[in-house]
Image: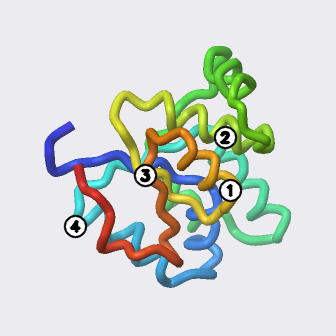
Amino acid sequence: MSSQEYLVYLDASVILRAVREESIATRTWLLDQQDNHGATFVASRLMSVEVHRVMRRAGLNTDVAERYLATVALIEVTKELCENAIALPHTLSGADSIHLATALALPYQAVLATHDRELASAAQATHRLTVVDPVTDDLNSLPVA
C-alpha cells in the first residue's frame, strides 16, 4: 500500500444509505474517498449478505447495490475471525462483532466508516481504528495515512 492509499472498512449501513439514496453526503463521500484520496474499500463478506437481504426485503433492485459492492474487497469470514468476534468484550450484535473483528484483523490501520453508533463506540474503544460517519463527521479532518 503506497503512502497515498489507505484502507476504509465499510459497514453495511454506509453502502445501504448510498444505494437507497438516503444520503447524498454518503454517496459523495464514497466517490471522493476512492477518486481523490486513494481509499481502498474493504469489508467482511457478511456485508454483502446484509446489503442484499435488506434490498430484497424492501423489494428493491439489487443492481445498484452490486455496483457499489464491486468496489469493495470482501474478506472471508473464517473460523478464526468468528472466534475473535466472540472474544470481543463489547455488547455488539453477532454481525457487528464480525465487522469489528474483521476491521481489527486488517494488516494496516483502517478507517471504519459506519452510521451505527454502537459499532462506532466499540471501534473507538479499541484505540486502533479511526471511526467516521460520512453524514455527521467533519470529513476534512480524516487522517490520511
| Residue that label 4 marks | 36
Q: Marks 4 and 2, Cα distance to the nearest angstrom?
A: 27 Å
Q: Marks 1 and 4, Cα distance to the nearest angstrom?
A: 25 Å
Q: Amino acid at mark 2?
A: Leu
Q: Marks 3 and 2, Cα distance to the nearest angstrom?
A: 21 Å
| Residue that label 3 marks | 130
Q: Residue 98, how many percent across, how many down?
A: 67, 35
Which is more toward the observer, 124 or 33? 124
**Dot placed on the residue nearer the N-terminal end, 1 or 4:** 4
**Dot placed on the residue nearer the N-terminal end, 3 or 2:** 2
How many residues crowd around disc 1 within 10 Å: few (fewer than 14), some, or many (20 or more)?
A: many
**Dot placed on the residue nearer the N-terminal end, 3 or 4:** 4
**Dot placed on the residue nearer the N-terminal end, 1 or 3:** 1
**Dot placed on the residue nearer the N-terminal end, 4 or 2:** 4
| Residue that label 2 marks | 46
| Residue that label 1 marks | 51
Instruction: In the rendered view, tell whether residue 46 sits above or below residue 116.
Output: above
